[in-house]
Image (spheres, rainbow, N blue to C red):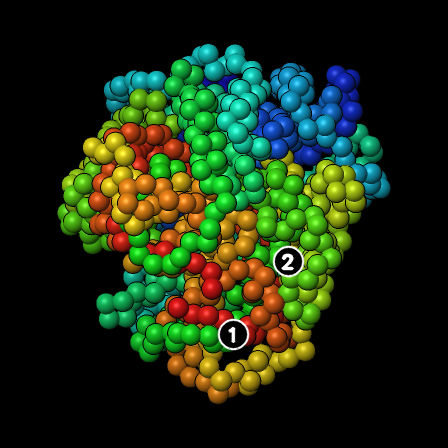
Amino acid sequence: MEKDLADFAIEYLQKLGASYVEARLDEYSGNSFVMKNGIPQISSFDNVSGLGVRFIINKTLGFLSTNELQKEKIKSIIEKSIKTTKSASKLNEKISFSSEPIYKENYEVKQKINILDLSPEEKLKILFEAHKLLKESKIKIPGSFFSLGDNITTEYIATSEGTRITATIPRVDFMYYITIQENNKTSQRYWDYGASGGFEFVNSWNIPQLLLNEAKACQNNLKKGKKCPKGNIDFVVAPQVTAIMVHESVGHPYEADRILGREAAQAGESFVTNKMLNTTIGSKIVNVVDDPTIENGYGFYKYDNEGVKARRKYLMKNGIINEFLHNRQTAAEMGTNSNGSSRAVDYDKEPIVRMSNTILLNGDYKEQELFEDVKLGIYVKNFMEWNIDDKRFNQKYVGAESFLIKNGKIQYPIVNPVIEITTPKLWSSIDAIANNTEYHAGNCGKGEPMQAIPVWFGGPSMRLRNIKVL
Amino acid sequence: MSQELARYLLEKLKKENVDDVVISLSSLDNTLIKFYNNKIATTKTWNSKDLGIFVSIKKRLVSTSLKTFTKEAADSTVKKILAFSKTILPNEEYNGIAQGPFKYKDVQETYDKKVLDIDPVDYVQKGINIALENNTKRTAGLFETSVADVYLLTSNNVEVQEKGTDLYYSIRALVNKEESGHIVSNSRVLSKLNIEKASKKAAYIANLAKNPQHGLPGKYDVVFDHLSFANIIDNLGYQFSIYNVESRLSCLNNKLNKKIASSKLNLYDDATLPNGINSISFDSEGVPTQKNTLIKNGVLKTYLHNTSTAKKYKTKTTANAGLVAPHPFNLVIDPGRSKDLISEVKNGIYITNVWYTRFQNHDTGQFSTIPRDGIFYIKNGKIDHPIKDIRVSDNILNLMKNIKSLSKDQEQIRSWEVDTPCFLPQALIKNVNITKSQ
């Protein structure tokens, strides 16, 4: 890694008048394997290096990037960027950053099974085994799409204030889409798996078996599923559904840049305002954290892309809005300190406020105990369609594998139950939380150009009382 | 030097007896100004130079890129490709790339050297000022300029190069937190970028959206403005790719030559569209691009193919490579005759923008999408009052079948959630299912 290029960019920008410079040099190497309907499609290996630099000049923020890593090229793009940024200073927002400690550290995530020790053939074999198991099941699967990937990124962050962090993070990921047919009806399931670490995580997912389980569940729902009852009923949602709810309606609306309006024309703003800090929005038993330091989390890091030390943040504590996600800019604007939430997906994207691993904390119940009190309800194990509005207030989750609960017992499958609910109603309807936390992986979209960044979201099963179903 | 290196790589790979090689060399120079609360948040300036390599060896397909532009790095990459290919398995469905050489026709209005000399800050300032002068309080958005150069070289006698420019302006104007309008202006040439029109319309919608009331669920006739209709068409567009049809990530399986939409709908994919954002004279394997009719009078006419998938289905390529997965370039819908769709609605809704479109089942087309920015209840041909907090929960094929009327005016839309540019009118769609939070 040519760290001297980052240091060169800092020196050159300072020479040209920048009051702050933060340079990030990335080296990425990765592999990906795609299979469609049992046939391998294309296999890829890639090596990418690049430099991304943020700077402040005339109290205006500028960002530049290049993958042409020669000093003359870097000088040239710096000069172009300085010209545009100086011009922008006539209409700038007079940027300032919170004051933060300086760190110097090297760290890496260890792999138990190194992704470089396995051949492409061994990786593809997992997808073949999965397809074989599905074929042997005799379940009619007219469409399947699998993607398996691994990569290692080494990132060097240097700032004009003296920060020097080098981080090496390996990641593995798997995504599937399957279509199940029964009679003339179809059902689909999609999900992502991901972790920071080695191939031991891919092995732990047991891809062939998880796909077989999914196919069987879809088939069962197609064969035996009945319509969802209407009226006011209870819901017990499993960890996968809790996970998406936490991400969409706790994580996103607590991003300080959205609250301040910076994402208004892209991912949107937030119904949450600065004045809502320390006010109640959920049941007393609801505690949600965003924690980049969870070992092997898909959104793991020890220092964010501004060099701020990462820590666990309580977004919601006992149902009260407790803390927003901040970078140094939003922290300065709201009169606080950064909590280390600044991330960029690649060298060529500006770091912005992001989630990392966002989790509803465990409650005291076993999952089974959540059913016992339910006279009429739905157990939603996972979902397909979901969305939420740009202020993060109105959301919809449509169940995939779902069952009727009657007098505390699971009965028969239910077809596509819908939870369409506001954020305050959702989090204040929860009266019991189980202790079966799972972590799920996703690539969260935000910013322009779009940055799909690896995150975990998770939590245990939880019970929602008295939800209206039309 | 870069093109020389591409040719060096090609010859080196050919000597190794590989079956197909496609090398694409691209350079990109971009500037983006992001603004919010009427101020510039940041400038972004970036360039990249990429050399992508696709190789087929006995149907074993490998893609990679060259990190360093030297002969030593090229030699090392060739060795890695050969070693990598030995450890993967063949794609038995793969049928090769197109045989050149080809003749190409210039696509009009895709490059404008004036784009290289503008100060984007001036354009942003103009846009913000227009929105504020039109009684809005806050603005947010971006202005991006791009200059691209693409060079394609294949083992089947293709060598072609094209330059392009691109301008993208997006503005959301707000009167209050829930009173906003969002409009984009897209062009390949400076003369057709219309920041003034976009800013004025965003401000107009924002002012019209003052004091929204809660919308009610039910079936409505809905007027989709260009931005919201483009989001839906973009979500249908990728489903024409035969790759997605085979994966069942498409609601168009087994529907070739069947009526899938209103007779009023004529949909094309056109990479030759003058000033089209994704217009280009060749596809990823070097086949000259063309205008493809996807839906004619409501009937599905073709899926999108590359040479390999076309051979499998005994048809001709539609020049939509994607070397593995064909894809649309610019989705175009014929205009209708209506000057004012709202006047045709007795009890309906006007939706100016949507986002977060997600499918419950691609195979059936069941989906939902959420309106954002100005949403309006229409009564007896006129906007009655603004509404909020509703969702379109329906089936995308139902929407296509229920197109009642299309407007005369077309706009080119590419936005944060519209990946494939769409050149289309507004649409009036009857009986759209609207839901809301309970």
Nearer to me, A170 or B422: B422
Q: Amino acid at mark 1?
A: Asn
Say if residue B39 shows up in the picture. yes
In the image shown, does A70 or A392 lie closer to the viewer?
Answer: A392
Q: Is residue B347 above or below residue A224?
A: above
Q: Residue at x 49, y 41 (%)?
A: B210
Dot 1: few (<14), some (14–19), or many (≥20) neighbours within 10 Å? some
What distance separates the C-alpha of mark 1 from that of mark 2?
Answer: 26 Å
Is label 2 in a helix, a strand or a loop? strand
Q: Is residue B17 visible?
A: no
Report the amino acid beneath label 2.
Thr
Left or right of B321? Residue A302 is: right
Residue at 50 percent of width and 54 percent of height? A388
Tell me where residue B79 appears, x and y as whole percent.
Answer: 50, 37
Q: Secondary structure at mark 1?
A: strand
- Mark nearest the camera among 1 and 2 is 1
The chain letter under disc 1 is: A
- Whether residue A434 sits left or right of residue B238 in the image: it is right
Q: Is residue A118 above or below residue B42?
A: below
Q: Could you tell me residue A140's position as x and y percent?
A: 29, 68
Subunit ID for the residue under disc 2: A
- Residue A219 percent location from the top left of the image: 34, 72
- Which residue is located at x 67 percent, y 74 percent? A363
Foreground of the two, B406 or B45:
B406
Which disc, if any, is residue A358? 2
In the image shown, does B285 or A303 lie closer to the viewer? A303
Q: Which residue is mark 1?
A: A466
> Label 2: few (<14), some or many (≥20) within 10 Å?
many
Which is more N-terminal, label 2 or label 1?
2
Classify residue A109 as left or right of residue B109: right
